[in-house]
Amino acid sequence: MSPTGALERGRHACQQLRWRDAFELFAAADAEVPLRLDDLERMALAAYLIGHEDDSTAAWSRAHREALRLGDAARAARSAFLIASGLMFRGEIAPSLGWLARAGRVLEEAEECAERAWLDTLNALVAMFAGDPAGSRPTFARCAEAGARFGDVDLVTMSRLGEGMCLVLLRDVDAGLGLLDEAMVAVTTGEVSPVYAGMTYCTVIGACVENFDLRRAREWTSALTRWCDAQPDLVPFRGNCLVHRCELMQLRGDWTQALATARDACAQLSGPLTWDTLGSAYYQLGELQRLRGELDRAEESYSRASEAGRPPEPGVALLRLAEGRIEAACSMMRRALDETEHPPSRARLLAAFVEITVAAGDPTSARGAADELVQIAGGLPAPYLHALAATADGAVLVAEGDARAALPTLREAGARWRDLDAPYESAQVRVQVALACRALGDHDGATRELDGARATFERLSAQPDLRRLNALSTESAPALAGLTARELEVLRLVATGKTNRAIARDLGLAEKTAARHVSNIFTKIDVPSRAAATAYAYEHGLVERLG
């Protein structure tokens, strides 16, 4: 094929979004006759979109130099911006700043142009993510106006994106997400070029997920999926799309498909180039493995998430809980909370901390975490977060022995989870409702709730939850008396004559935690001694039933 024929076919492939074919055709033509500026830019774009980062950078670097040779400073700066943007999206800030500095030098003698506003926008993005959203916001507003004046839709979109993210980071979430929606309008109508469209999709969806706006996250993830599917060769944004799809699949109970999607995301985001969302992909994989009882695999996935820069909490702490290492789980969560100030990030940690401290027989710590979670939820109009807070509050009320107050809170939580189409979380709430019903003497109601939860856990293959449910189902109703599943385990061991130290060793607890459980048990069943507790256990068939 002649170079001219390859170029024509390469341009046609670009129009059809066949990026791999386009890159190969341009590369073949370039090997015969060096490409001119327009086709160099097309080859650079195609290379970027199929994940050939080095080839893309090389082509855009050549386009940068060729534009300089032609005396077109603005176009030279554009190539530098695209290189910088790609590096920034991957989390490589230092080399991105280097290219921005080069673009700034190129534009020193240029007349007023959109590229000057581009430089300000990209520098403002760096400053915003470095912790200065308040200082960056006026720059984005000014650059959006410049973009409109110069008719540069990409610039307007990225500036709106930046201003919206500033508002979100400044906790004006409603206004911020509204601006992000506005930025997405141009993306979904095809007005924005592929690189900046992909970056906008991923940034907006990430902000929605971070702030618990699942309605928006679902809608924009569906749009991103369609956008990716229309470009089968796409690499840079497909892995991010898969991570978000996995999160939403997990919530709606499609765990088998979510597992396959998480593995696909890990494969897409690793390889010759490692993307900064690789840690999130491994974290999602670990979450699903933990929920299904694949604890060794979950351990490995959380470890890989940590290596890729994604903190493994709260998932790894909940893994320790599933392993029976409650003291380790508590210590891990206290440390993570000490290091986390951002309210949405704290909310996820607090929900897990409540679950862990309730299991540890520490309702005081659980109450403090639940109250903070309720307070955070009060500041965000996010149904998911309100469901999370109501679940935590209800579970703590059950642990505190106030089953009557717990029931309306848990009923509210269950309704919220059902509205969100979240079957696993709904089933977890049903277990708490069953505990409250038992404490109030409604054993038929408790059985009904446990049976409903079991059906969901069986469908999802939620093995750890099924094991906990089996333990609850074999407990006699009178023996429950407000005791948690962990306290029943401890009582059984007390009845076999074990000391606190032996109980701690058998259950993977600290000795002081075992002692606290024993003290709580004595209070709940109103006995003064280990001998009386042993008699209580035998009277109610606990040793026989749990043994």
Image (tube, helix red, strand yellow):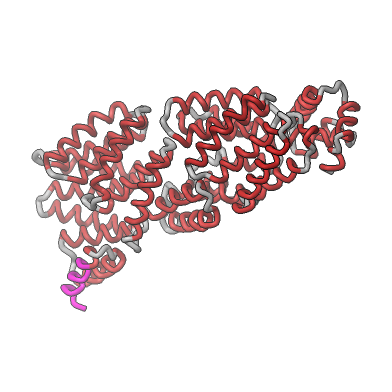
Residue at 54% x, 32% y is 412
Q: Nearer the viewer, residue 399 or 79?
A: 399
Say if the magenta span includes residue 161.
no
Residue at 27% x, 62% y is 17
Is 163 situated left or right of 467 in this image? Answer: left
| Vertical side of 392 occupied by 321: above or below | below
Is 357 situated left or right of 498 in this image? Answer: left
x, y (%) of residue 528?
A: 86, 21
Residue 119 falls in which quadrant of the image?
top left
Q: Nearer the viewer, residue 413 or 168?
A: 413
| Vertical side of 264 occupied by 188: above or below | above
| Vertical side of 337 occupied by 82: above or below | below
Q: Main secondary structure of the magenta part?
A: helix
x, y (%) of residue 338?
A: 54, 27
x, y (%) of residue 29?
A: 21, 70
Which quarter of the rendered picture does the N terminus lie within? bottom left
Residue at 31% x, 26% y is 134
The total number of labels drawn is 0
Which quarter of the rendered picture does the C terminus lie within? top right
Quick check: can you spot residue 295? no
Say if the magenta span includes residue 7.
yes
Q: Nearer the viewer, residue 64 or 532?
A: 532
Residue 166 falls in which quadrant of the image?
top left
- The residue segment tinted magenta is 1-12
Quick check: can you spot residue 135? yes
- Residue found at the far bottom of this picture: 1
x, y (%) of residue 154?
A: 21, 46
